[in-house]
Image (cartoon, rainbow, N blue to C red):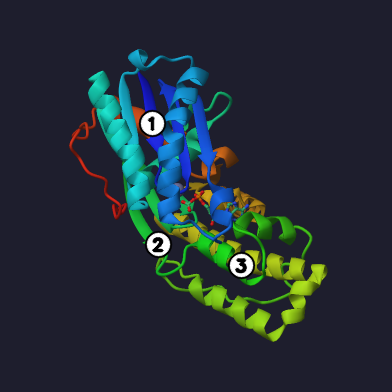
Amino acid sequence: MTLLAIETSCDETSVAVARDGRVLSSLVSSQIELHAEYGGVVPELAAREHLRNLMPVAKTALEAAGVSSGQLDAIAATQGPGLPNALLVGFKAAQAMAFALRKPFLGIQHHEAHLYSPWITGDPPTADFDAFEPNVSLIASGGHTMLVHVESELKHRVLGSTVDDAAGECFDKAAKLMGLPYPGGPEIDRLASGGNPRAHDFPRPMLRDVSDDFSFSGLKTSVRYFIRDHPEALNDAGILRDLCASVQAAIVEVLVVKTIRAADRLGVRCVTASGGVTCNRALRGALARACGEKGMILRLAERSLCTDNAAMIAILAGRKLLHHAPETSPDAEILPGWALV
Ligand code: KG4
Ligand code: ZN
């Protein structure tokens, strides 16, 4: 079964070709530079860039995979959630492709695809579902932060999510307050490596809350107050590094403690993580240590599969077809608010 998948839910135009659980090619055309000028993703610009890039990226993905359009058995695309106009570009193009080729079409829930990305490993990236374990999965990105109990393959239940800002949004907003470029997460990660994470005691919101929900807007506000009260911090490289390390430590502690606590409570012995924030080195290290102490298995999505990509869409779509999931109608519409349940 050879599939082509398209992902355009936010600011990455991505196309992947996969065959029988193996990713033959996965291309991501990032728009980070375009949006950096505005300090965040501008939806209209994202959609325009998807329109401009989608066909060249799809053509290159097919060439890189050594697959012709006639050899495709199915087409998939992200149906939601995401920016409406951005989703429209990829979803409608995929439907048109499926219609023209008379092949099945699958609309995929973006977060469901994130759930399975930690099981894609190796070179070429291959789905390792034989190793699948019931797990608690942390999805931490710029738009979402959630904990999901993945009870079995294709069966999952959301345990909690952020009530305000996402973890990535907190990284980005804190970085913006510090005058660092967009996206701020990687900048804070880089600067934090030379700083003292215990220099400043920022709040750990909802750490002791019994629910599996998160909240990060209060942390962002305390960074704002800190900078208001210590404007000199931004002109001192050492203090700035300490500030980055301390903010990062607060975000990481909340994510790790709540993830491990949920796994413990549910008696689950495997933890997985994906989403852009999972690129963060401190988070990867802290999850590894915490899982090690608990004797839990940790599966982190590979860095290239943490951020948005069509490879995870292709792998999930292939898995769904294998399990005889119903096709999506060629007339179906995008679902920008489609929430994982
Ligand atoms: O999953 P993603 O590519 O897109 C969304 O769906 O949002 O995640 C992007 C987010 C941004 O907020 C970015 O700052 C954050 O992931 N991010 C990081 C790191 N790399 C990306 N946050 C912390 N440390 C990083 N190394
Ligand atoms: Zn995502």
User: Which quadrant of the figure has residue 152?
Assistant: top left
Left or right: residue 204 compared with residue 117:
right
- What residue did someone put label 2 on? 161
Q: Inspect the image, locate mark 2, and give the three-letter code of the amino acid beneath it.
A: Ser
Q: Quadrant of residue 329?
A: top left
Mark 2 residue crowding within 10 angstroms, few (<14) / some (14–19) / many (20+): many
Of tags 1 and 2, the one toward the viewer is: 1
Q: Earlier in the sequence, mark 2 or mark 3?
A: 2
Q: Give residue 288's position: percent from left, percent from top.
A: 62, 49
Of residues 303 and 203, the one drawn nearer to the viewer in this rendering: 303
Say which of 136 and 120 sits in front: 120
Residue at disc 1, secondary structure: strand
Please name the residue that numbered disc 1 is placed on.
Answer: 5
The mark that comes first in sequence, 1 or 3, is 1
Q: Residues within 10 Å of mark 1 (few under 14, many from 20)?
A: many
Locate residue 66, reporting x and y percent. Answer: 48, 14
Could you tell me how far apart the alpha carbons at marks 1 and 3 are, in whole angstroms?
34 Å
